[in-house]
Amino acid sequence: MENQTMDALKSDGRRMEGWLYLIRCNRLGLQYSRRRYFILEENYLKSFKSKPTSDSQKPLRSAIVDSFIRVNDNGRESLSRKVFFIFTLYNTSNHNDCLKLGASSPEEAARWIHSLQDVAMEPGTNSKRRWQPFRLDDSKNTTRKNSVDWTSSANMHVDAMTSDVIAPSHWKIFGCKNGLRLFKESRDSNNSAERTSNDHPAIMAVGVIEGTSESVFRTFMSLGLSRSEWDFCFYHGSVVEHLDGHTDIIHVQLCRDWLPWGMSRRDLLLRRYWRREDDGTYVILCHSVIHSDCPPQQGYVRAWLQSGGFVVSPLNQGKECVVKHMLSLDWKLWRSYLPKTPARSMTIRMLSRVSALKELFKAKGGGEFPSEFLNGEVESFQTGDEQMKQEVEVDPIQINENDKMEDANDAPVSGSSSLIGLNDDEFFDIPEESDKNKPHSDTPGLSTAAGFVKKLHVLAAQKKGYIELQNVDWDASTSQCFGSTLLRDLTHNTPCTWSSSDPSLFLVRGENYLKDNQKNKAKGTMMEMIAADWLQSDKREDNLAGRSGGIVHKFGGQGGPEFFFVINIQVPGTTTYNLVLYYMTRTPLKESPLLERFVNGDDGFRNSRFKLIPYISKGSWLVKQSVGKKACLVGQALEVNYFRGKNYLELDIDVGSSTVARGVVNLVLGYLNNLIVEMAFLIQANTQDELPESLIGTCRLNHMDTSKSVSVESIEKSINNNNNNNKM
């Protein structure tokens, strides 16, 4: 078996090295992979055809990783019957300059992603030029040792391991069975959405498995025949549609043996989304959908999963893991003769699959799960069309042609090169926009597949809380200005309104954080939230604070001391949504040195410091697990454009620039009108003189509704009419 693992970090050079796969396209547009040995040392990424035998060996290609480089987690892809965990490096100043790499495991991919992100966010790698060329220059490598701030990145990963929100638990234990603790979701009398689902409440089973979180995750994702070794409910499974590396539509048929006597077979059509957290936790979320390619089948009654999934967290230094399996399932029983009790008992029995998997891992000796049980991960990964493409892709004649062209271009090169150069062959570059596994976009100028909203709910179920965004009738008659389209409601009861959240809900780094890693309740905010916009447009809308007629422009014309911090969250697609939050302070920036440095600093510094803490205070388990409660360095995960004006700084956050973020927003938008979303924003403190941390501001959004978003075009038209009337 080929050694796919990475070498350990070397203390003398602080470098990362190991085998990865270049994912490239041939002249027919079909993807294939080539194995290469990569070394990340300082801010240089080098590729070799084989493992180098000495430090003086010249690489095939080399590139500089600076502050303009972003790393995007693309999830899983199957090529030539191998499952790869893909990540893409791209340059924010030239999106065609990108490099697509694959790892053999999610853990290996995560380590590379984190290392590359740490190097890219290091202030020493920033360039004053908009574009920095990529060079082969080994002499620099020997003179700039330990330039990467590994301590700073370590602090970031510690943050990711704990919740940054103080919130009560919504689960209550009601029993223990087969070594699993059983919990039920506590009912909230104020939650109308939950009152509608009392007939099939959420139930969760929690247990410990003697295996790594990665092995358990890949076992859960497998839909092959080996699944019947532990999943006694499973009869057959297949992928209906592969949406992207983190999302697919799957069809699962349940066997009849464990169902009550006389009950027809059940099947499920699910939208499945997964992601890996920084602490090694894997989250798999599922809910039922409707898909034209998989209608109800004869002999089966289609059950309805409101929400469900798995959360697999590492334990005992990764040797074990805690598994949480949750289901809120409507079995579609005939209520005329069956009481509610059988439905609850069937859900509990289905949850006991975790106990069966626990016994299987124990019988196999724990640790890494045998590879034969992961074969189904490949067999069931592709749809029928994709399998046909793979047959063409592994054509021996085409492979031979690829090898010949590759050998002709594998000689070491010198001089400048780009990320594309690391592909070894100019004929095989793969611009990110042409990635065949990404959704198409009608929105120009976005770095990645920004058109995910176009297909966002085509597969969605027609049920309350899951909206078809394409069928909404927009009201373009609203006449308002920028900074006034979303109303404020201090009672928190009016739908589609905003207010400020309680800062004490959120945890920030304390004064002694560098010594004890302790976080404390935030005591207040540096700025006050004064306005919000909920906008929709047919194109990307940047620098809204700089447009005339808005609240920022009006204060700027008065020449007062007010300074605005504007956060523009962009959800791209055929209809682009913008959630714009306006924070204001009258205190001079020089009294907050870290804030002043952020406002007047470069993009590299800003990307390495701006943090968001999300919290779904009211909503389904599915959405809460999707969003989480952990702080995130936004500039490291998403592409952010900064606009500095005379009296403002605007951050335009492109949600479409990340596959993981697209999956999260997909779920959130679907249930948006049943959610209360709370957020806090801050600048991360890394040094003692910057501690303790302070929040920039907080926000609470109450039951947002896409149909109530206001057209940017109508606002600009209204502003122009007002200006013309004033001239008269």
Image (cartoon, rainbow, N blue to C red):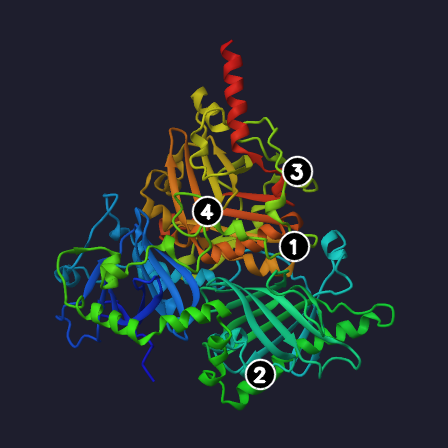
Mark 2 residue crowding within 10 angstroms, few (<14) / some (14–19) / many (20+): many
Asked whether disc 3 touches disc 2, contact meaning CB atoms under 8 Å apart, the reply is no
- In the picture, the quarter occupied by the N terminus is bottom left
- Binning the other alpha carbons within 10 Å of mark 3 as few (below 14), some (14 to 19) or many (20 upward) gives few
- What residue is disc 1 on? 619
Foreground mark, 3 or 2? 2
Residue 463, horizontal then vertical, whole percent: 70, 54
Type of the residue with mark 1: Gly
Question: Which of the two discs, 3 and 2, labels the residue nearer the N terminus?
Answer: 2
Q: Earlier in the sequence, mark 4 or mark 2?
A: 2
- Compare residues 429 and 191 and report the one nearer the observer: 429
Q: Which mark is residue 682?
A: 4
> Where, by quadrant of the figure, is residue 49 drawn?
bottom left
Residue 490: image tag: 3
Q: Is residue 152 above or below residue 552?
A: below
Mark 2 lies on residue: 358
